[in-house]
Image (tube, coloured by chain):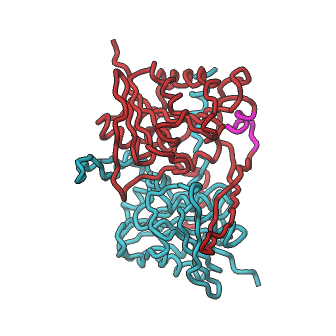
Chain colours: A red, B cyan
Amino acid sequence: MKAKPIILLTNDDSVKAPGLRFLIDCVRPFGKVVVVAPDRPQSGTAHAVTVNHPLRLELLCKEKDYEEYSCNGTPADCVKLAFKVVLKKRADFLFSGINHGSNSSINIIYSGTMAAVFEGALAGVSSAGFSLADYRLTADFKPSAVYIKKIIAEVIKNGLPRGVCLNVNIPAIPEKKIKGIKVCRQAEGTWQEDFDARTDPQGRRYYWMTGVFIKTGHGSDTDESALENGYISVVPVQFDFTANKALEPISNWFS
Amino acid sequence: MKAKPIILLTNDDSVKAPGLRFLIDCVRPFGKVVVVAPDRPQSGTAHAVTVNHPLRLELLCKEKDYEEYSCNGTPADCVKLAFKVVLKKRADFLFSGINHGSNSSINIIYSGTMAAVFEGALAGVSSAGFSLADYRLTADFKPSAVYIKKIIAEVIKNGLPRGVCLNVNIPAIPEKKIKGIKVCRQAEGTWQEDFDARTDPQGRRYYWMTGVFIKTGHGSDTDESALENGYISVVPVQFDFTANKALEPISNWFS
């Protein structure tokens, strides 16, 4: 009998987040599950890594085919520590999330959930991140369970091409309204920030960052379009950021 | 007479870093320069943004065609605050660095210097980041001055295509050994981490992250190859992370 695959789970909302607890339940039937997740929320932490202070791991639970640790670092730190210190080898698969809030379009660039996924892919591990378009702690993850399990089963069955990982986003709608899964490209979009300027009791100015997401492209083949139309979006993403089309025109500047 | 362009400068090594001070000197002849940079080192901070604590700005210097501010946030925060609060509009150009340490190959994913550049490009501003392959505070930036000014002049003359920014890396070699500028693609590479495990005075285990960069691809058209051969590398980069080649095979999983 083939050995059960070793599956690493992490997230950026902390080890206690309902989204991770839900993902754990989805993934456990597929193999030996090891959770290494931040000990506190790390949203917006992006691909930060911790080199200027020491990292700690805490074993929270150990039972048959299941271990759970918290870490005082970022999601990227969690993956590095998991491979090198906890497992002492790479996992077979990595899943991250389920994030409380969308990581579609340009949100991927700010996402700790997806940074963990990039770390997995960089280590050669088939990796996918899941996010639900609902920021609330009380978000309902149940409608997506059957689709999440389908995606996990396909990743485990097929593996992912080298250098490619998946960014999965789920619309916050009832199960019967979900139309299916759409593989699509990252929509063009940006955040339009605003700063709420206030004055502290010492008379000094400070700012709270706020903002709204602005779609700047409108293709029907994008993740934003899929989500708007009731589909779960699956964007295959890569960490080669080269803008190949710009190589030649910019080369001409220096020739 | 045409108005001088407004040029935003930032970095991730802090407003006091010699690399930024050098870049300021390179850029001032080109326009009205506004510096908004972190008040302390932010290396490895990647694209983190600050939403859970307030941001502050401090005016450090104001003279003809020059203003300088420090901010308690990340490089991405600095750019957002600069456009929205300091300038109250987008800059015409953004330059970030000069980073103390290389941001070639996969280092881009961890880089605060390049996160600031992505923020500029996301706002539609022609943006480039500069990094010298020497981590030391005493690094010598002078050998690259003529090339940095050449790249800045070309960016200002031509602008950059929408959605494209530049990742410029400089080898740490004497000026006469620099062979020129090469426009190239991001090399395949990864970090092989190690964790130095120690025990604190309370008997608890903690870890320091260390690591070495490993080249995993060997093309002569990459930034790593350019740097090894004495060239300054210029990689045009984009923030559409879609792995276009993987769209069709992964679509087949769900059809």
Q: In which quadrant of the rendered view does residue A65 lie?
A: top left
Q: In which quadrant of the rendered view does residue B94 lie?
A: bottom right
Q: Is residue A165 visible?
A: no
Picture layout, residue A29 above or below residue B195: above
* Residue occupying the point 36% across, 38% down: A82
Instruction: Report x, y in % for residue B52.
Output: 57, 55
Q: Tell me the quadrant of the picture where the C terminus of chain A can be found.
A: bottom right
Instruction: Report x, y in % for residue B157.
Output: 66, 72
Please state which of residues B33 and B216 is positioned toward the viewer in this rendering.
B33
Instruction: Report x, y in % for residue A112.
Output: 51, 45
Picture layout, residue B66 above or below residue A108: below
Picture layout, residue A199 above or below residue A98: below
Q: Tell me the quadrant of the picture where the N terminus of chain A can be found.
A: top left
* Residue occupying the point 59% across, 79% down: B59
Outermost residue, top direction? A1
Q: Please state the total of marks drawn on the protein image.
A: 0
Q: Is residue A220 magenta?
A: yes
Q: Is residue B168 magenta?
A: no
Q: Is residue B164 left or right of residue A152?
A: right
Write the start and end of the magenta stretch as one range: A218-228
Instruction: Report x, y in % for residue B85.
Output: 68, 69
* Residue occupying the point 59% across, 36% down: A131
* Residue occupying the point 48% across, 24% down: A27
Q: Is residue B203 visible?
A: yes
Outermost residue, bottom direction? B64
Please state which of residues B248 and B230 is positioned toward the viewer in this rendering.
B248
Please state which of residues B169 and A190 is positioned toward the viewer in this rendering.
A190
Q: Is residue B116 left or right of residue A184?
A: left
